Each structure stands twice: as C-alpha cells, then as structure tokens.
C-alpha cells in the first residue's frame, strides 16, 4: 500500500468513526441507545445459561454458616462481611434462574450507566465479558466509587466487601474533605454495628476468613495464572496509595478507581472491569473543562469589552484633543467620533473629528 492510499484509508477511517461517534451521541442523548442496551441486557439475562461462578456463590451461601467454604478460588466461597450475608439471605430463597437473571441484569445496567456508548465495545473485552458472565461485583464497586464523590456513604459497599480498595478514601484525606470521609466511615460503621447486633458471632468468623486468605493469590505469591495476576498485595498497596494521592493533589478523580483496582485483594483478570469506573469520571472532567473554558471565554470577552469601553471613555477624548488641537466640536459630532472609534479604530475616529472640525471652521 502506497503512502497516499494509506493516508486516504486513515482519513476515511477517521471520518467513519467520527460519524459513528456523532450518531451514537445523538442516540445516547435521545435515550434510545441506553434503552436498547438495557433491553438487550434483559434478553441476555433471561436466556443466559445459569453457570455464573461467583454469582452462584452468593446465592448458595448458607446464612447459618456462610464461611464454611471461605477460601479464595474455591467453588461457592463467600468472602464478604456479615452485612452482605444478611443482605443476600432473602435472595437465597429464590430459584437460581430467577436470581441469576436479576443479578445479571443489575450488572448489565450498571455497565450501561458507567460506559454508555462504549458498552458494546467493552463487552468485547475479556475482563468485562467475564465479569458479567461470572457475576462478580467489580462493576458495582466501580459504580460505588463514582457515586462516592457525591454520596460518600456508597464507599461502605467497597469497605464491607473487598476491603483493601478502600485505599481510595485517601482522596478525601489528601484534600482535607473531612465531612465526606466522616460520612463514608460513619455509614460503614453504622452498617457494621447493626449487623454485629444481629449476628455478633459472624464478625469473628469473617475476621478469621480475612486472616486465612491474606496470602491467597496476591499477598505473598508472585506470578501470572490464566485467571489472576499474582503480585504481592504488600507491593501493590503503596503503589495504589501513590496513585490516589497524586490524583487528589492534581484533581484527577479517575485515579481513584485505578488505585482501587491495583489494591484489590487478588488481581483477578476480571477485576480489571473495575476500571470501567474511569469512563464517567473522564466524561465529568471533560465536561468540567469545557464549562471552565466557556466561562473563561465569556469572562475574557466581557473583560475585553470592558477594556474597550474604558479606553473609549477615558483615553479617546485626550487623544482627540492632542490630534485636533483641543477643538472637540459639538456633542453630536463627538458621538459620531465615538461611534467611529468603536466600529473601526482610534485613528479613524480622530480623522473624522478633525475633518468635521475643519468643516466647522470653514463654515
């Protein structure tokens, strides 16, 4: 392929993607695209084979003995706090096909909310497709983190499930947003307190689960498996903290889901779906940047207009007096001079004044 034909192909591809992006944007604005995606998600949820590995663990959990299989990577292992034992307990009475249909639709709807027009493309990414297929909670964690900037209590979902991605709360610490931090921690403590009153024994069991799984696939191992990236948590946590601290200091919210991903207890491949939370935060940053740019432009235009008016009101008469020997004619003539100044330039206005003044002298 010649350079010219290659350039033409690249240009055509750019135009095609630009047209596609515009069309998707219009569909998204009208609500047609989200509705279509949700409809597709509902159909998939209803007809999908009931083989969700992680979701089955939530459904099969025995509320009277939830941590009997609590070993990372084991079938039907339930590893979350007693708060979620109690939250999932009513759902365990549903037939599994009903549970998995509703759960899958919830995950799909969360993905649509986070990704919008990128939903279909992201479903082609193995991590995201595996997340929806297995029924894990990484997409829900991503949504909780995004919402946590406005409603910090949503961080309780993070802290009472995967725990270590709560490193993202350093955002509030670095930025001294103490109220938001207090809400996040207070909501978590309130939920834990209520749960402890209901079933105090489960909390001791859960702490034992955390201790026994602290070295499973990430805390001490180092390597790569088909389903997990085995990098010690002791190495990843400082990296995650550095990411969120840098992001907080530079007002980059998208770094929070990135740091949460890095700080996952185990870096399962499907855990990368948590990074979908970056998309709405980038959209928000772009929208904020556009708004600031528009505001600056309007402010700049107002300032420029004010400056022009100031020059016209304060400097024009003195310049005119210098050019015309101090003879400034009548008020009507001066108005014509001022109009000439504003419409063209100072010199045009001065020339008009001098011409009018000569006519007056001749007359």
Image: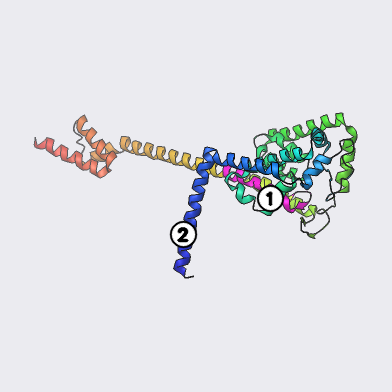
Label whose residue precedes the other's in the sequence (1 or 2): 2
Rendering coords of residue 126 (x, y %):
69, 54
In contact (CB < 8 Å): disc 1 and disc 2: no
Residue on which disc 2 sits: 11
| Predominant secondary structure, magenta span | helix
Report which residue position mark 1 lands on: 129
Residue toward you, 109 or 98: 98
Q: How many marks?
A: 2
At 67% from the left edge and 45% from the top edge, which residue is drawn?
A: 256
| Front tag of 1 and 2 | 1
**Within-10-Å neighbours for mark 2: few <14, some 14–19, many 20+:** few
Residue 179: in sight, yes or no?
yes
Tell me the element at label 1.
helix
Residue 283 inside the magenta-drawn segment? yes
Q: Quick one: which residue is furthest to the bottom in this view? A: 2
Depth check: give the residue in front, 221 or 101.
Answer: 101
Q: Looking at the rendering, which quadrant does residue 183 occupy?
A: top right
């Amino acid at each position: 392929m010649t350079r010219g034909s290659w350039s033409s192909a690249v240009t055509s591809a750019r135009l095609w993607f630009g047209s596609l992006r515009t069309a998707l944007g219009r569909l998204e604005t009208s609500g047609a695209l989200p509705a279509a995606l949700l409809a597709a998600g509902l159909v998939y949820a209803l007809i999908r084979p009931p083989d969700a590995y992680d979701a089955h663990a939530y459904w099969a959990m025995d509320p009277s003995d939830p941590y009997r299989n609590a070993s990372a990577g084991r079938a039907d292992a339930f590893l979350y706090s007693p708060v979620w034992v109690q939250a999932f307990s009513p759902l365990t009475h549903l037939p599994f096909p009903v549970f998995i249909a509703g759960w899958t639709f919830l995950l799909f709807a969360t993905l649509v909310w986070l990704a919008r027009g990128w939903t279909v493309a992201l479903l082609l990414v193995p991590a995201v497709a595996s997340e929806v297929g297995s029924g894990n909670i990484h997409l829900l964690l991503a949504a909780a983190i995004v919402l946590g900037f406005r409603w910090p209590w949503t961080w309780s979902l993070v802290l009472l499930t995967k725990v270590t991605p709560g490193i993202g709360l350093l955002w509030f610490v670095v930025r001294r947003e103490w109220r938001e931090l207090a809400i996040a921690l207070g909501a978590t403590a309130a939920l834990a307190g209520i749960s402890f009153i209901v079933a105090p024994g489960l909390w001791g069991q859960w702490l034992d689960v955390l201790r026994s799984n602290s070295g499973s696939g990430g805390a001490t191992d180092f390597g790569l498996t088909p389903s997990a990236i085995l990098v010690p948590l002791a190495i990843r946590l400082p990296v995650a903290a550095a990411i969120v601290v840098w992001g907080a200091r530079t007002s980059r919210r998208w770094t929070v889901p990135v740091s949460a991903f890095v700080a996952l207890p185990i870096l399962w491949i499907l855990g990368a779906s948590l990074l979908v939370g970056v998309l709405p935060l980038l959209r928000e940053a772009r929208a904020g940047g556009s708004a600031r740019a528009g505001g600056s432009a309007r402010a700049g235009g107002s300032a420029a207009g004010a400056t022009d008016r100031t020059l016209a009101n304060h400097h024009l008469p003195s310049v005119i007096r210098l050019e015309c020997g101090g003879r400034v004619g009548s008020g009507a003539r001066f108005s014509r001079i001022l109009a000439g100044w504003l419409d063209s330039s100072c010199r045009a206005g001065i020339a008009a004044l001098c011409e009018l003044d000569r006519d007056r002298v001749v007359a």
